[in-house]
Image (spheres, grey):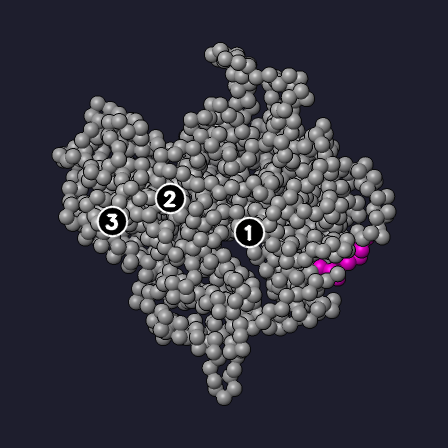
Amino acid sequence: MADSKPSISAPNASHTADVNGGNVDPAEARFSDFCKNGLALDAKTRAEALKLFGETKHLLQTNVSGIGSGTPEEAERFWFVFILYSVKRLSSKDRDNAEERSDDCGVTLCQILRAAKLSIVEFLKELPHFMVKAGSILSCRYGTDWENRLEAKELQANFVLLGFLSKFYKRAYLEFFLASDANMDKQSTTGSPTDYLSEYHRFGWLLFLAFRTHVFSRFKDLVTCTNCLVSILAILIIHVPVRLRNFSILDSPKLVKKENKGVDLLASLCNNYDTSEDEIKIRMEEANSLIAEILKKKPRLASECKSENLENINPDGLTYFEDLMDASFSSNLDILEKDYDDAIQVKSELDERLFINEEDSLIGTGTLSGGSMSTTGVKRKFDSISSPTKTVTSPLSPQRSPVSHGNRSLGVASSKITATPVSTAMTTAKWLRTVISSLPAKPSPDLERFLVSCDKDVTNDVIRRAQIILEAIFPSSTLGDHCGTGSLQSANLMDRIWAEQRRLEALKLYYRVLEAMCRAEAQILHATNLSSLLTNERFHRCMLACSAELVLATHKTVTMLFPAVLERTGITAFDLSKVIESFIRHEESLPRELRRHLNSLEERLLESMVWEKGSSMYNSLIVARPSLSAEINRLGLLAEPMPSLDEIAVHINFSSGAAPPIPSLQKHETSPGNNGDMRSPKRLCTDYRSVLVERNSFTSPVKDRFLALNNLKSKLPPPLQSAFASPTRPNPGGGGETCAETGVNVFFSKIIKLAAVRINGMVERLQLSQQIRENVYCLFQQILSQRTFLFFNRHIDQIILCSFYGVAKISQLSLTFKEIIYNYRKQPQCKPQVFRSVFVDCSSARRTGADLTILMICIEQRSAQDHVDIITFYNDIFIPAVNPILVELGPAATNMKSNRVPEVNNNNDAQCPGSPKVSPFPSLPDMSPKKVSAAHNVYVSPLRSSKMDALISNSSKSYYACVGESTHAYQSPSKDLTAINNRLNGHGARKLRGSLNFDDVDVGLVSDSMVANSLYLQNGSAASTSGTPLKTEQPDS
């Protein structure tokens, strides 16, 4: 039943350490030569790098086949880059005195990669593997905060962000200017615009990089960067020679805002790109200051200048530099180049000038984060990296046919059909700017009425908590430590302004949603005293964290990636998972992209984060499953007590004029009887029941596509108060359950539903029978119920992959782990670390007599805990634990299984974690076309994401409606469907030449639920999944 592990050989014979007689190890000799001759590193840096290489060399030798293409030579080059990047980022001189780095060799990551002949994409794909393997060594050498200081995730997100911005900038530039300068001996303008762009295009990008370096040194988000590029575009329009324009000022469809004095340039650009005119004016002023300070140019009011470039343009509010692009233009480019060179030498980051030349081989042409998004040619990369589960291609979205993914081009410059990551972000930011920012930054009168009506007035508590928590998430007092080399004083000011703006947006969103929740609660309870909800500390922090995360997701920040909000608010992933669905439900105007973001977050929480060490889920699990308490305590998995507000305030040096510390707050957090802080899972609480979530049809993104489908009368989600109460508190809903048992039941049901989607996707790819699918699903449920400890510190996909192989073995199928991994790589949620690095506990392995492979790895790592590949985990951990369950799924147990299924089918309630009963595989979304007319060949097929953008483009929004996408700003989809049906039926619209007739089909008003059932859910009238052949696909070439 166990699979033989592929042999992993040393790179070659010469790579084996040979210290006899004082000989130098060949691998170390090659690394030393690479540092000295290939990069000319100074002796101090070289010595530190050699020491780290020596400490991690054994990891390279045992993981050659898992690095890059698996060749010893390439694996060694990867390891060289990993070591040098770690030393550059983590060495003491970098940590204590950033300015010393300018006196160093100043080697950059790009220089290291060029010397190693590796691309940035290849490096970013393999870096997480190195971090997992060498994590314990890096922690011992550089401290436990090494991962935060390494900033690997930020580096990857920044790389993708710049790819988006460079494409946006090139597209916008080509809308206004020719691709090349006829005065330069370059490629003809008849060539492809992607091959060459003029020096003016390069000037604009260098000015943008100076903006990033000097003006906003820390918070480099997509929205702010786009505003900067739009302001730079305005500067180019009024300075680039008129001969290079491909538009007419008076006739251009891009410049539609006209006044008596001429075209309003800024208003027109803001109209084109959904930017804020106030923001663009601020960015213009900052850009003009950069030009004056760096290039030493004298600014003049445009209204005082006579230039061909300014004809027919309203000069009010514009600044003009007469000598910016004259004979000194080449020297201006050199100055900007030199300025950026100085910055990159100090920061040791990516050379961002690469992005104006997509042909540079250093960028790379591979794929990142799951294999569904191309690194150089396809959009949405930023979402895939900042969130491991894509916000657009979600694993919980209706499963597409595996062969349906097409590569979509970004299109020509004038195309309005295809939405881009930048345009999507700007549209979402417009919602934040127009709907949220206009709200008051304090509780509304209605919300204040609820706060005052509690057992005691909690208004001051709520206000103070919000101030402290949001200050912790968006700090402004310690920004000086992160300013890098920004020589201009505006860097600190920009960061403070940015942080203050984000705090206000999150605060207003928090108050808005909190008021909606209170209003719904009061209507159900027929009371305004909501003390049980409004005095819960953990609930409020989760709400604040969710609000802040949505603000961060709107702006697409690079340096504050999830789970930063969890760390700064003192809550855990399990805490946040309890509030996501209520938050979505009570903010109806939330844009589609933000709903998708919360969907992706919930998937991340369920698949791995909730299972990590320190999750508060374990505090509930030891109450719901006492038999697991010994293992949980032995591994040290329990969550630490939630820090008090006063502790957070001291940590962030909170002194923004807020009210002094309120004694009642500290009492709420430390009192043994309060439900706001789970310092002890043994507390009791007598608060009355909150029924906020019980009578609303909206469910979480994980659950909504399954409940209507299965026609199950499953338990409603636990009330919010129960979800945040002490684990041992009796559930007010009855049934004899504790709050911990109820919460764990709901959590397990979400896990099972997520697993069902992923199991089904793998079955389709592997072209397996439905009996195999049933067996894998059954095995997964039983492991979750009876072998829950296998999930501890692991990813649920690791259990799914092992379940597939185990079922294949017991069913005597010819299916190898290699085939399983090959097809898993094509899944949208795939991350190589899932099958490369599986957690094992060596102390447990010793006690259970596990295979020597794990023990030897632990000895080599000098650690009690380590990560192994999935085959080792399967052979040595999974099979010994699961074998008794797996045997029951074999052919000999078929009769026993058939006798057990009817009993399960009669139980529609959520299963208790300890129950041996399992449910049959649920019906999943079927993306196949369905016939809707008995008399005619009329079919309805769910709309695929690849075609959605074209249908909802500006030119056609009034004719199409997609589920979850409004045809008008922030309008409910149900209103769209009503309007479309009225138009089709001729109500209040011009007479159509013909009418649609679906014969027997009732063309009445279509409700949201009907559309959901038709498009995403396979209802009872449709052919069941079990009765239709599974989709198949050919392996990728």
The segment highlighted magenta reads 877-888
Left or right: 608 in relation to 208? right
**Label placed on residue 167:** 2
Give, as a three-letter code, the residue at label 1: Ser
| Secondary-structure class at tag 1 | loop
Identify which residue, 936 or 52, lies in the foreground: 936
Res 219 visible = no
| Secondary-structure class at tag 2 | helix
Residue 926 painted magenta: no
Give, as a three-letter code, the residue at label 3: Lys
Q: Residue at x 68, y 67 (%)?
A: 843
Mark positioned earlier in the residue sequence (1 or 2): 2
Q: Position of residue 249 (x, y in %)?
A: 24, 30
Give, as a three-letter code, the residue at label 2: Lys
The correct choice, above or below, for 457 with respect to 889 in the image is above
Left or right: 600 in relation to 501? right
**Label placed on residue 186:** 3
Mark 3 nearby-residue class (10 Å; few <14, some 14–19, many ≥20): few
Q: Considering the image in quadrants, where does the N terminus appear?
A: bottom right
**Label placed on residue 1037:** 1
